[in-house]
Every structure is written in C-alpha cells, then in structure tokens.
Amino acid sequence: MFRRWFLCFIAVQLTCVAAPPAVEQQARALQTVLRQADDAYYNQNRSVMSDAAYDALRKQYDQLLADYPELAAANPVGAPVDGSARRVTHDASVLSLDKVYSDKEVGRFLQQTGTNLLYCIEPKIDGLTVILRYRNGQLVQALTRGDGKIGVDITPAVLASGMVPSALTNAPTQLDVRGEALLPLPAFESLNRRRAESGQAPLKNPRNIASGTLMLTDYTEIARRRLEFQCFELLATDSLPSTHTAALALVKKAGLSVVESVAVPSTDVLAAIEDLNRRRATFHFITDGIVIKVDDLAVRDRLGATAHHPRSAIARKYEETPVQTRLLSVDWSRGTTGKLTPVARFEPVEIQGATVQSATLHNLDHLRSMDLKIGDWINVIRSGGTVPEITGICPERRTGQETAIPDPAE
Ligand code: IVH
C-alpha cells in the first residue's frame, strides 16, 4: 500500500517539474508573439511574419509546453500584459560611456589606462542598448537599459523584430550580452517611403525610431521595420575569455552579429580612429562617435568604474562641424498622396568626403521655424555622418539681398 502511494507521489513529482523563471519568461514572450501572429492570420487575413519564422517560434513554444505542462495553465491565452510587470531590475548597473571631443583627451585616456596595452576601436552605433539573455541557446529575456538600474522587458518585441535568432545552435549554457539595436539606413528610407505613401509625415531620426519600435505592441509593424542588432559587450558566460576581442569572437561563434572591432597598440589608436572616421559615411547605420576600450578584461576589471562609466573605455564623439554654403532654391516634392515636402538646393559643398547639394526641410513648419531666405548662407552637416541636414542660417552674413522663399505652386 505504502509502495503504491510512494510510486504515485514520485509520478506526480516527475510530471510537475516547476519551470525555472527564465523558462517562464521565455514562454510568456513566445506566447505573446504567437498570439498576435495567430490573431493577424486567422482574424485579419494578414501575416505578421514569414511562415518559417512562425514555425520556428511555434516549435519552441510547443517544446516548452511539452517539457513544462504547467506553463499552459500559468499563461492563459488572452492574459493582459501589465506595464508595471515589464520593469526588471538589472543584475548589475548598466553603465554609460564617458565622452571626449579631442585627440588630446584620447591621449590622456591612454595614459590613465596604461598605454602599454591593446585598445579596441569600434564605431559608436547610434541606436539603443539592448541586453539579451540566452540560456541553453534560447533567448529567454531582452531588456532595455532604462535608467541603468531598472530596465523594461522587451522580449516579445525583440522576438517579433527578428533582429536576433530566438534560438542559437552553437551557444554556451549561459550567454548574456549587451549590444545596440539599430534601424539600418535602407530600412529607415523605406519606412519613410511607406509613411509618405499613406500621407504620414516622415520620421527624422533612426535612433528614435529604433527605440520607439521596440516599445510597440503591434508585432506586425515591429517585424516590418527590419531592426538589426550588433553586440558590443559580453556580460556573462560559462567561462569568460581574457580579452574583449576573444569575447566578441565567442559571441559571433554563438551566432550573433557583433560590432566591427579592431585591437591596436596605443601608438596606433589615433590612426585607427581616423580610419573609422573616414569610413563612417559608408556604414549602413548612423554612428555618433568611436569607442576606445581596453582589450584586456583583467585590466578592465582592475580599472573599475565610476557610478556612471567604466574607466577602461571612452567615447570619442564627432564634432558635427557645420560647413557653410548658400541656399539657391527650395523645391517642393510631392509624394504619391499629394503631400508637399520642401527640399533645399544649395551650392555644392564637400562634407566628410562627399559632395552634398540638397537636404530635406521635412515640412512647412520646419521650414518656417528656420527663417530661411533664398541667398542665405546656411550651415550644413551630415547628420550621423550621412544624412545632409541644414542646422541653421548665418544671420551675420545677411546682406539684405536675400529673397523670400516662394510658396509652392498649386
Ligand atoms: S561599450 C559600459 N561599445 O553607447 C559601457 N557602447 O554612451 C559599455 N554604444 O549605452 C558600452 N556602440 O548603447 C559600447 N561599440 C560600442 C557602442 C556602444 C554604441 C552605445 C551603448 C551605450 C552608449 C554609451
């Protein structure tokens, strides 16, 4: 009798292995994405994602339910996602970077950190920090930086975005990484084309779009925006390598994209910065500087951090030095919906290796806010190293000969 009761007890225990919190999180995230994909497909006759992507996520979810049957009961279909439930305290403070604006300050940083070391030089991508946690190759959590102490759980949005694989086939048991979510420039342009076609104003800044996108709960829209992820830091893994270069190689081998990074001795740091600077306009994403990091992770740990930034890395920010030129005309370009966008034409100028002669003025309000006149001397930059942008006029160079910008011909 006792033996039968005992066997029953063991059988119940075996079928009710509690899911670890990370698995629960993953199940919740997968369920959110799948629920919306199903709703779109069955109720609205549209597809949120490709069949292959859907099948891969569905397979993972079914496997989780097979392994942990109680998850199905814990995550009833239709359970609302509570905003406050999405706030997560980070394991360790998510620090920022100290910024410098000159080669002299870079020299000071090299001296303070040791000089006789290798330094990694990387583009500073202008997107938003995302922290990813993989367990046994499965993406179980994605977080924003938030205030550095508390972030927001954006796992469903990251899964829907397709910016990283939901399952890695070659990953260590634990893989926690930090990287940048970004909107590639071609995706930015196609998003604005799509908006123009439906009569919406163009969006100005790929960084804001990337962060806004990951806060959406419309997973169809998230998937359409084609965000990308590039890892720039390995936070934790089964056995940490001894250099940042090896850490990025490990992350890459596990199946994630990593930022371009080159390790050089201190004597070559300025040349490596210059080289990245020259190639900046060829990147398919916006950068707002260059990051210089100590490669040796033991030295990094020894140097430690302030409450705000590590002492082993800095951001060399670009000065977006404006170039002056003269405004020749303002043309109006009409989108397919009939909406007019003002486009400035100016005397061609060379900025960071490219000749530019026109820039969008976005809309009538933007144009009026600048108080532009034909013949004005204007300041032009290549915003984020690529997109021509008029930042203002040079009022002191006005002669009185400037003329008002004609209204668009109807
Ligand atoms: S390293 C401890 N590397 O810049 C700080 N950051 O102002 C580790 N960023 O919040 C950051 N590209 O989101 C690092 N190659 C890169 C980066 C990068 C972009 C962002 C990152 C960070 C911000 C710091």
Image: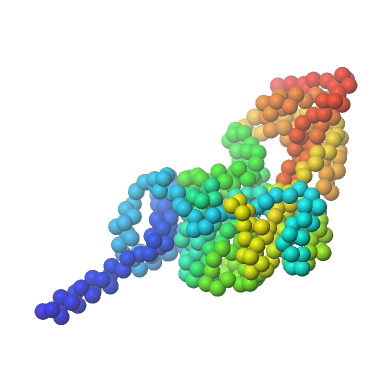
Q: Residue shown at 79%/57% (left/top)?
A: 107
| Front position in the image: 109 or 276 | 109
Ligand 1, by image quadrant, is bottom right
254 vs 344, left or right, is left
Q: Residue shown at 32%/53% (left/top)?
A: 76
Image spot of residue 139 (x, y percent): 49, 62
| Front position in the image: 47 or 213 | 213
34 vs 277, left or right, is left
- Quadrant containing the N terminus is bottom left
Image spot of residue 261 (x, y percent): 70, 63
198 vs 153, left or right, is right
- Quadrant containing the C terminus is top right
Image spot of residue 332 (x, y percent): 73, 29
Q: Residue shown at 61%/51% (left/top)?
A: 308
Q: Residue shown at 73%/49% (left/top)?
A: 100
Q: Is residue 372 visible?
A: yes
Whether 407 is drawn above or below 235: the answer is above
| Front position in the image: 248 or 196 | 248
Q: Is residue 287 visible?
A: no
Image spot of residue 23 (x, y percent): 40, 63
